[in-house]
Amino acid sequence: MEWKLKMTRNFLNLWIVTLFTFLSPTLVYAQDDQIVVDGGLGILNTEGSGLSQVKFAKFGLQEDLWGALKQRFNAGVWLDSRGDGHSSSTFSGYQLGFEVSNEVLQASIFSGPNLISSPDVALGGMFQMNESIFLGIKDSDCNSIGIVYNHFSSAGIEQPNLGKDFLGLEIKFPF
């Protein structure tokens, strides 16, 4: 019974987070938007996780604000098979950041608040911060691909605050 209640609560959290993520950007996006897709694996961090134990996927919509200043709305999931108090979770949030590029190279850094559906022994609450750093290459149509590092933690607001780190591949393309 407890397992069914937890699954129902996680399912409801996912719907709330998903509705927030996909309804709010439709009100603000202009024509220079990009779709951002990340996928990757958990990397070694303060939790000591192995590469194969935590998988990560993130989908986002990115908008130009002013010059190099951008905003993103994200939703995603990590799948954690370690047990011992670690759990898989969905997440959704907003990030503000800077992106610079020339004809070939592109770099960006983003940070912002996120809600997660399942706090665990590494992330002590539903409110978390997500920072991401990207370095990649782009083509003449503004499609880009590169390496991305994502970090989730509560910035010391909630305990425990061990954080979760992910290294992956990020693909961006305009729509």
Image (cartoon, grey):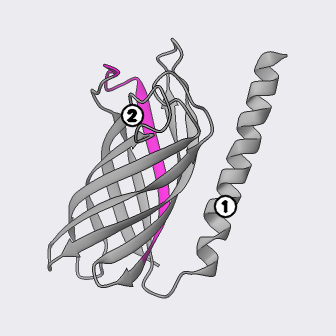
Q: Which residues are magenta?
A: 47-63
**Residue drawn at point x = 20 percent, y = 61 percent:** 136
Examine the structure image and report whether residue 49 is included in the region drawn in magenta: yes
Structural crowding at the residue carrying mark 1, measured as other residues with C-alpha within 10 Å and reported as few (<14), some (14–19) or many (≥20):
some
Residue that badge 2 annotates:
164
**Residue drawn at point x = 28 percent, y = 68 percent:** 144
Q: Quadrant of residue 142?
A: bottom left
Q: How many marks?
A: 2
Q: Quadrant of residue 103?
A: bottom left
The answer to whether residue 134 is above or below residue 80 is: below
**Residue drawn at point x = 59 percent, y = 72 percent:** 25
**Residue drawn at point x = 49 percent, y = 44 percent:** 128
The answer to whether residue 39 is above or below residue 19 is: above
- Image coordinates of residue 67 in percent, x first then y, are 29, 84
Of 104 and 135, nearer the camera is 135
Of 47 and 61, nearer the camera is 47
User: Extreme top residue here?
Assistant: 84
User: Extreme front residue here?
Assistant: 157
Tell me the amino acid under the disc marked 1: Phe
Label 1, label 2: how far apart the Cα atoms are: 23 Å
Residue that badge 1 annotates:
20
| SS assignment at label 2 | strand
Tell me the amino acid under the disc marked 2: Lys
User: Extreme right residue here?
Assistant: 1
Which of the two discs, 1 and 2, labels the residue nearer the N terminus?
A: 1
Q: In the figure, is residue 19 to the left or right of 37?
A: right
